[in-house]
Image (cartoon, helix red, strand yellow):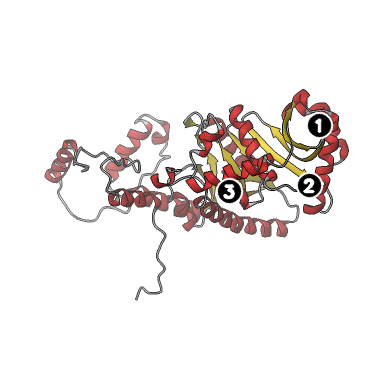
């Protein structure tokens, strides 16, 4: 009867509890869903709960079905607890309460109500959130959009990011813009004190590969310069223009930046630029261009006139990490393309943009595509993240 029913994916939250139960170590600690446990690892029934159940049992007069919204008196008490009994939300009867089978059930009922009764088609959910929230809303035909919520640096609420994302969402919707979700590869800095500190977070095999690549790259027979501000001189742009043209011709057909752009960068932007240049026998042979943000390094252009093993990885990725650690930058954004970045510590991350199309039919067609694209992007990010280089078990710690 059930052979045609495919097995649902394991719940990531409950899966943690299963993994905890299966682990035989005496020193294990369950950092999953917050549940009180005593010294024996048992979740006891609190005395207050037992007393409440006793009183309910003694005062209960019927076992008949409740109304579809649940116990109305209970609902009123909940409203008073949430808003305060004198709040105008209650006096103006702007609140409704319905009992549900748990928090997940409440979200699903709310999602169905929003979609079927209020005509809402999109919902913004905090990032991070519980792993099942996205699928709960998506199964009710709502398009799910994330907004920033947690700041890993401060270990607190990312209020500015949250406000910016929600304001942008509101402004974009008001202007009739289409919201697109894509992905780039970002290296995140939780506070590493050195490159070795970053390597210590990786699996043993990935650490060895990166050390091997760095050693090979730095044996190309020359030297590597990291230049910013007044260290950048016009002749550096002469060399980088050659690199940029080579890469542009191979990747885009026609490079879109002009030579005049790099002169303008020298005049106005060099304090916000990091050039990583490789020189051999007195000639620059390769280079990478980065823009320095307030808390982020943005890797943008790379090129070479001679191809040396692993030099691309050294100039574009590893030297960028060195710079970010030294200057306490929160992350390095290495752009969208190239799954090879994953093995070098750059993890896929969602990015968002707003778009407009004048033709109504074209606008609607793009909107449908973006919904499907977002689903595919989310799945790709989930899969690629699982193959990231960071260690997952204590066995990975060994050199």
Q: Which mark is nearer the camera, 3 or 1? A: 3
The residue at the point 40 percent across, 47 percent down is 395
Q: Do we see residue 23 in this rendering?
A: yes
What SS does tag 2 mark? loop
Q: Earlier in the sequence, mark 1 or mark 2?
A: 1
The residue at the point 61 percent across, 40 percent down is 170
**Front residue of 286 and 40:** 286
Q: Mark 2 to mark 3: distance in Å? A: 25 Å
Disc 2 target residue = 306
The residue at the point 57 percent across, 57 percent down is 376
Quadrant position of the N terminus in the picture: bottom left
Tell me, yes or no, whether the two marked residues, 3 and 1, touch with CB atoms within 8 Å.
no
Q: Quadrant of residue 288?
A: top right
Disc 3 target residue = 342
Image coordinates of residue 23 in percent, x first then y, are: 30, 49
Estimate how packed mark 1 is, as few (under 14), some (14 to 19) or many (20 or more) residues with alpha carbons within 10 Å: some
Q: Mark 3 to mark 1: distance in Å? A: 30 Å
Disc 1 target residue = 265
Relative height, residue 254 to residue 93 (above, below): below
């Amino acid at each position: 009867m059930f052979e045609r029913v495919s097995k649902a994916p394991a719940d990531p939250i409950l899966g943690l509890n299963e993994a905890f139960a299966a682990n035989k170590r005496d020193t294990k600690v369950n950092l999953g869903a917050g549940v009180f446990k005593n010294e024996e690892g048992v979740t006891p029934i609190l005395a207050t709960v037992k007393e409440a159940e006793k009183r309910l049992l003694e005062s209960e007069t019927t076992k008949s079905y409740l109304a579809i919204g649940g116990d109305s008196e209970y609902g009123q008490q909940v409203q008073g607890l949430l808003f305060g009994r004198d709040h105008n939300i209650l006096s103006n009867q702007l609140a409704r309460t319905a009992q549900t089978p748990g928090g997940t059930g409440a979200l699903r009922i709310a999602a169905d109500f929003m979609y079927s009764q209020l005509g809402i088609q999109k919902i913004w959910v905090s990032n991070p959130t519980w792993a099942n929230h996205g699928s709960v809303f998506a199964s009710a035909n709502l398009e799910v959009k994330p907004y920033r919520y947690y700041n890993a640096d401060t270990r607190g609420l990312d209020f500015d990011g949250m406000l910016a994302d929600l304001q942008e969402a509101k402004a974009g919707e008001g202007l009739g813009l289409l919201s697109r979700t894509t992905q780039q590869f970002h290296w995140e800095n939780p506070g590493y004190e050195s490159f070795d500190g970053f390597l210590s977070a990786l699996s043993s095999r990935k650490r060895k590969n990166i050390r091997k690549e760095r050693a090979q790259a730095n044996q190309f027979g020359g030297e590597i310069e990291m230049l910013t501000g007044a260290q950048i001189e016009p002749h550096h742009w002469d060399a980088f223009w050659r690199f940029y043209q080579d890469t542009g011709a191979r990747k885009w057909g026609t490079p879109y930046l002009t030579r005049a752009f790099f002169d303008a960068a020298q005049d106005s932007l060099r304090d916000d630029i990091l050039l990583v240049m490789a020189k051999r026998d007195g000639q620059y042979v390769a280079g990478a261009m980065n823009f320095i943000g307030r808390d982020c390094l943005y890797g943008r252009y790379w090129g070479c006139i001679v191809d040396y093993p692993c030099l691309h990885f050294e100039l574009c990725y590893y030297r960028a990490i060195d710079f970010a650690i030294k200057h306490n930058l929160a992350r390095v954004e290495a752009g969208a393309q190239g799954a090879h970045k994953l093995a070098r510590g750059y993890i896929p991350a969602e990015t968002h943009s707003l778009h407009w199309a004048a033709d109504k039919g074209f606008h609607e067609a793009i909107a449908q595509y973006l919904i499907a694209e977002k689903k595919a992007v989310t799945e790709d990010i989930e899969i690629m993240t699982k193959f990231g280089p960071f260690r997952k078990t204590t066995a990975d710690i060994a050199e």
